[in-house]
Amino acid sequence: MSLVLPPNKPVSFAELLSSIRASLGLTQGEMALRFGVAENDIQSFEQDYWVNPEARRKILKQMSLAINWS
């Protein structure tokens, strides 16, 4: 996975999620299916909007597993 993030600029979690998804070549819908959440949860998370706690937990857990942070 090759992330492209701006140098010397703080990155929000929303930007990080979007970059990871893009680097994997996934649509929001495809990522949602893999993470077991609704597509609008991924959309909301990427736009820094509130995501329901259960979806947030699933998204964070799947991301941590993907990068071996368990």
Image (cartoon, rainbow, N blue to C red):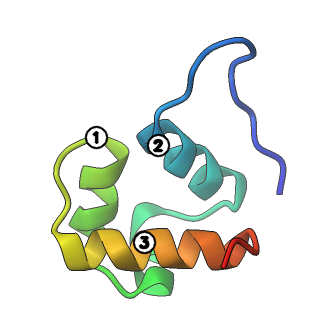
N-terminal of the pair, mark 1 or mark 3, is 1
Q: Which residue is mark 1?
A: 48
Q: Are marks 3 and 2 in contact (CB under 8 Å)?
A: no
- The CA span between labels 2 and 1 is 8 Å
Question: How many C-alpha atoms fall within 10 Å of the one at disc 3: few (<14), some, or many (≥20)?
Answer: many
Label 1: which secondary element:
loop
Q: Amino acid at mark 3?
A: Ile
Q: Residue at x 16, y 51 (%)?
A: 50
Question: How many C-alpha atoms fall within 10 Å of the one at disc 1: few (<14), some, or many (≥20)?
Answer: few
Residue 20 placement, left or right of 17: right
In this view, the residue farthest toward the front is: 70
Tell me residue 68's x, y (percent).
76, 75
Q: Are marks 1 and 3 in contact (CB under 8 Å)?
A: no
Q: Amino acid at mark 2?
A: Phe
Tell me residue 17's x, y (percent).
52, 51
Image quarter of residue 25: bottom right
- The CA span between labels 1 and 3 is 14 Å
Image disc number at residue 59: 3
Tell me residue 13's x, y (percent).
47, 43
Q: Which residue is mark 2?
A: 13
Q: Amino acid at mark 1?
A: Asp
Q: Evaluate whether residue 38 shows in this view.
A: no
